[in-house]
């Protein structure tokens, strides 16, 4: 049975502290996430992203834990991760969110070498309800190993009117591949489709809304593991 993490107190303060690592967020993006099995929708949840439109090495993903609490999964691809719970009422109104070092982990992406097996490919644009969208996919370039190792394929459908925002990646392999080549268009994805190695749709993520915010997550510099990278 998974132990529930304690609810953290949020720092509702505008004081700047030079001894803290700061992560600034300027957008909140809501998605509807649907999981499929045998082509049938089995479960749908809401997922919220705190993002920085100019920096995509870090991302906070928020889901509903229950009626009162959120769960936040945060990751900085440069070396930090944490998973904590917050009261919804606190997180919604907080501008500064202080996370104690006891919850912060030293993160290393164990799949960095996978960029040798994957690549992004730009696809033809698609039209949805009269609007034209960019499309690209992340897939294995080792075709013989694709099914043998059950490697998945992601397809992104991207709003052309959101080029002000860098690409958003939940999976570290996608981020590392983008960082190595930067060969795809910027923008907030309208849809993200995940297909298994047999071409079956397993996950669909659909954009609900997005708007600007002003939130900052802070951690003490003693647990800023990015300094050691």
Image (cartoon, grey):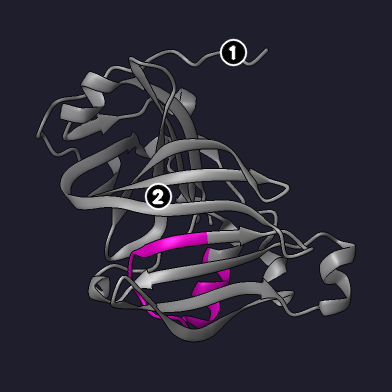
Q: Which residue is rendered at x = 41% and y = 42% of the image?
A: 61
Is 197 in front, or is 184?
197
Residue 229 vs 42, above or below: the answer is: below
The answer to whether residue 122 is seen in the rendering is yes
Residue 3's mark? 1
The residues colored magenta run 175-192
191 on left or right of 115: left
Residue 103 vs 21, above or below: the answer is: above
Between discs 2 and 1, the one toward the N terminus = 1
Is 16 in front, or is 141?
141
Q: Which residue is rendered at x = 15% and y = 28% of the image?
A: 93
Secondary structure under badge 2? strand
Residue 38 drawn in magenta: no
Secondary structure under badge 1? loop
Residue 184 drawn in magenta: yes
Q: Residues within 10 Å of mark 1 (few under 14, many from 20)?
A: few
Expressed as whole percent of the image width and height from the top left, the position of residue 43 reads 56, 35
Q: Which residue is rendered at x = 49% and y = 16% of the image?
A: 5
- Locate residue 21: give its quadrant: top left
- Locate residue 219: give its quadrant: top left
Mark 2 → mark 1, Cα distance in angstroms: 24 Å
Expressed as whole percent of the image width and height from the top left, the position of residue 92 reads 21, 29
- Locate residue 132: give its quadrant: bottom left
Is 173 in front, or is 149?
149
Is 190 in front, or is 218?
190
24 on left or right of 195: left
The answer to whether residue 19 is seen in the rendering is no
- Contact check, label 2 and label 1, Cβ < 8 Å: no
Q: Residues within 10 Å of mark 2 (few under 14, many from 20)?
A: many
Expressed as whole percent of the image width and height from the top left, the position of residue 70 reads 37, 25
* Residue bearing mark 2: 59
């Amino acid at each position: 049975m998974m132990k529930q993490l304690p609810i953290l107190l949020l720092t509702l303060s505008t004081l700047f502290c030079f001894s803290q690592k700061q992560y600034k967020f300027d957008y909140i993006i809501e998605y509807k996430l649907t999981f499929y099995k045998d082509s049938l929708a089995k479960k749908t949840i809401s997922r919220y992203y705190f993002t920085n439109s100019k920096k995509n090495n870090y991302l906070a993903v928020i889901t509903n834990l229950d009626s009162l609490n959120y769960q936040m999964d945060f990751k900085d691809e440069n070396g930090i991760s944490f998973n904590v719970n917050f009261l919804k009422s606190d997180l919604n109104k907080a501008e500064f969110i202080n996370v104690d070092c006891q919850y912060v982990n030293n993160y290393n992406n164990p799949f960095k070498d996978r960029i040798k097996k994957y690549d992004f490919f730009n696809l033809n644009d698609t039209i949805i309800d009269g609007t034209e969208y960019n499309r690209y996919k992340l897939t294995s370039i080792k075709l013989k190993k694709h099914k043998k190792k059950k490697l998945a394929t992601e397809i992104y459908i991207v709003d052309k009117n959101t080029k002000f925002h860098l690409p958003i990646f939940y999976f570290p392999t996608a981020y590392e591949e983008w960082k190595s080549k930067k060969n795809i268009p910027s923008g907030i994805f309208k849809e993200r489709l995940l297909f298994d190695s047999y071409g079956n749709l397993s996950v669909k993520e659909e954009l609900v809304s997005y708007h600007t915010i002003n939130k900052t997550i802070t951690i003490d510099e003693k647990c800023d593991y990015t300094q050691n990278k």
